[in-house]
Image (cartoon, rainbow, N blue to C red):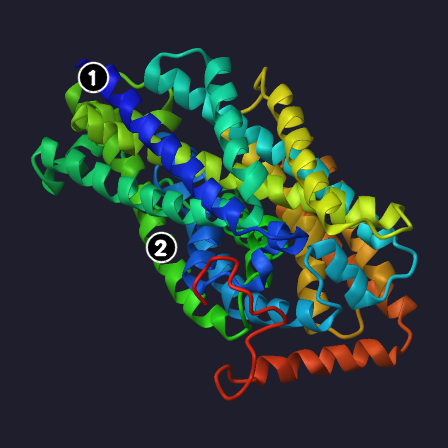
């Protein structure tokens, strides 16, 4: 068989595995809450790996190694900022959000939680937050579709649009019916594949070059600054601004709906501890692997004389040059896994925004659970089609598309998620002004070449607006005060001492 045939076999096996997981999830999805949140009984290991895989997307295996390949360790500050942000998110936000969403009317989406937490009777907060989710997630999913097209184009010499269509169809096939559980379980498999590929490929490249001793001289031939974390001998104002902007990526974690919704699906607040340890281990290994892939890849192509047209495909091309075609096929599948894991998670969140936070708000009579589930699947299809149509003509790099959407969510939701959990005086008007102010700042700031990542000013504007407007509109509310205190009490409960882990102990086919 030809090398290309082996690659196609590996890819077909991967597709079949993802669809099989989707079928399993669909059989264990009984109602609308299962479809949106897996019955709040997602095991810590699944939540941890799912959050990581849905977070990183094609950026981890394509965007970050490509950036390191081009600029060197100066771009590793993004990885540092993300790692710090992810740890703080798991450490502080995860357990309290899990508890608070249960206390506050068992909220199953971020918009519904904000409305219930702040007792917003105007419904504006829920509607505006849902619109922001739809806008930025459509752009985010668009980036995944573009990454899928680029993947097939560079790996198989295939047509970009054919790759785009295949990614969209297969991802839809398991997300449409498996819902949140299907997205989460496929994320687990995909996350493990991503980490393995990022650790194995650079090791084989080092071995092929004759050991680590060959890497430094090879990089020195390309340029002396690739191994310098400040990008050069002199630390200028521009370098400092660049590092601050890179670190600011970590602020985005607090406002990413497709990540923090995993916290809400945990069986109890206490489960966040074990999930954090698993998730951070996965993230540290994957980040290190991605950075090393970029550096080792540069040395490898410099010494071997092989060509690399697109730096964002460094992992893909090295895998095909260094591995047996069937193994290389599974590495390529791991890259595709990174892309699809994020798309699937974001499609489910978009569906929840359309059904839970727009449709149910506008319809007075309560629709049946079956009707909601069918509508949720229809919304998944709708968003996927819109994002795919936008991706037909890509107009930015993968990293550029992801960074803008990441900034939009981080600035819109990050400040108010933190304040809603830890500051009892946040008001609905403060949250609303912060969301709009953060989103507008990101859009406006991105139009100017300041060197400062738009997430940072957007986050600051949102935070300031939330505090100032909340202080001006604050009125004591006994229910809000009680729920704030009850959340702390729920977090203190030790699961196992005669306490139930959460509002719903159905397994949804998963071990608790």
On the rendered image, what quadrant is the C terminus found in? bottom left
Percent of width and height locating residue 313: 36, 26
Image mark for residue 162 = none
Image mark for residue 3 = 1
- SS class, disc 2: helix
Left or right position of 290 against 205:
right
Q: Is residue 123 above or below residue 484?
A: above
Left or right position of 244 against 473:
left
Q: Is residue 4 above or below residue 145?
A: above
Residue located 72% across and 83% down the image: 485
Q: Quadrant of residue 416?
A: bottom right
Q: Nearer the viewer, mark 1 or mark 2?
A: 1
Q: Quadrant of residue 136?
A: top right
Q: Which residue is mark 2?
A: 282
Residue located 11% across and 32% down the image: 209
Q: Dots 1 and 2: beta carbons under 8 Å?
A: no
Q: Earlier in the sequence, mark 1 or mark 2?
A: 1
Front position in the image: 106 or 278: 106
Residue located 45% across and 64% down the image: 44
Percent of width and height locating residue 214: 12, 36
Percent of width and height locating residue 497: 50, 88
Left or right position of 90 against 366:
left
């Amino acid at each position: 068989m030809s090398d290309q045939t082996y690659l196609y076999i590996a890819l077909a096996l991967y597709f079949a595995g993802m669809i099989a997981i989707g079928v399993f999830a669909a059989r264990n999805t009984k109602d609308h809450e299962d479809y949106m949140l897996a019955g709040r009984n997602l095991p810590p290991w699944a939540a941890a790996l799912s959050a990581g895989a849905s977070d990183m997307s094609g950026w981890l295996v394509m965007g970050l190694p490509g950036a390191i390949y081009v600029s060197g360790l100066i771009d590793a500050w993004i990885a540092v900022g993300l790692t710090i942000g992810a740890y703080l998110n798991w450490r502080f936000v995860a357990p309290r959000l899990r508890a608070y969403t249960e206390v506050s009317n068992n909220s199953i989406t971020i918009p519904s939680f904000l409305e219930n937490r702040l007792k917003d009777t105007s419904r504006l907060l829920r509607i505006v937050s849902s619109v922001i989710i739809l806008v930025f997630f459509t752009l985010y999913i668009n980036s995944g579709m573009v990454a899928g097209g680029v993947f097939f184009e560079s790996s198989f010499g295939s047509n970009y649009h054919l790759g785009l269509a295949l990614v969209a169809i297969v991802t839809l096939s398991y997300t449409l019916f498996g819902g949140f559980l299907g997205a989460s379980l496929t994320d687990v498999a995909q996350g493990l594949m991503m980490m393995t590929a990022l650790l194995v490929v650079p090791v084989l490249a080092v071995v092929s070059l004759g050991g680590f001793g060959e890497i430094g001289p090879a990089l020195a031939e390309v340029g002396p600054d690739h191994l310098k974390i400040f990008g050069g001998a002199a630390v200028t104002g521009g370098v400092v601004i660049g590092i601050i902007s890179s670190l600011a990526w970590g602020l985005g974690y607090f406002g990413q709906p497709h990540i923090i919704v995993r916290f809400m699906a945990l069986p109890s607040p206490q489960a966040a501890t074990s999930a954090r340890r698993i998730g951070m281990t996965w993230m540290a290994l994957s980040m290190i692997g991605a950075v090393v892939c970029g550096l080792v890849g540069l040395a490898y192509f410099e010494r071997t004389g092989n060509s690399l047209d697109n730096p964002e495909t460094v992992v893909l091309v090295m895998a095909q040059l260094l591995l047996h075609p069937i193994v290389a096929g599974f590495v390529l599948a791991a890259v595709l896994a990174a892309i699809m894991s994020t798309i699937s998670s974001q499609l489910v969140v978009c569906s929840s925004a359309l059904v839970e936070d727009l449709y149910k708000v506008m319809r007075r009579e309560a629709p049946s659970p079956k009707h909601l589930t069918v509508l949720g699947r229809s919304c998944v299809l709708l968003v996927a089609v819109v994002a795919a149509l936008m991706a037909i003509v890509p107009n930015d790099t993968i990293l550029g598309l992801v960074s803008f959407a990441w900034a939009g969510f981080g600035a819109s939701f990050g400040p108010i998620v933190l304040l809603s959990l830890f500051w009892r005086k946040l008001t609905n008007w403060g949250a609303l002004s912060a969301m709009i102010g953060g989103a507008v700042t990101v859009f406006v700031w991105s139009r100017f070449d300041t060197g400062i990542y738009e997430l940072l000013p957007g986050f600051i504007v949102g935070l300031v607006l939330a505090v100032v407007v909340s202080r001006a509109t604050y009125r004591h509310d006994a229910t809000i005060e009680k729920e704030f205190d009850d959340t702390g009490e729920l977090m203190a409960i030790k699961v196992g001492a005669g306490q139930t882990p959460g509002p719903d102990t159905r397994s949804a086919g998963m071990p608790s």
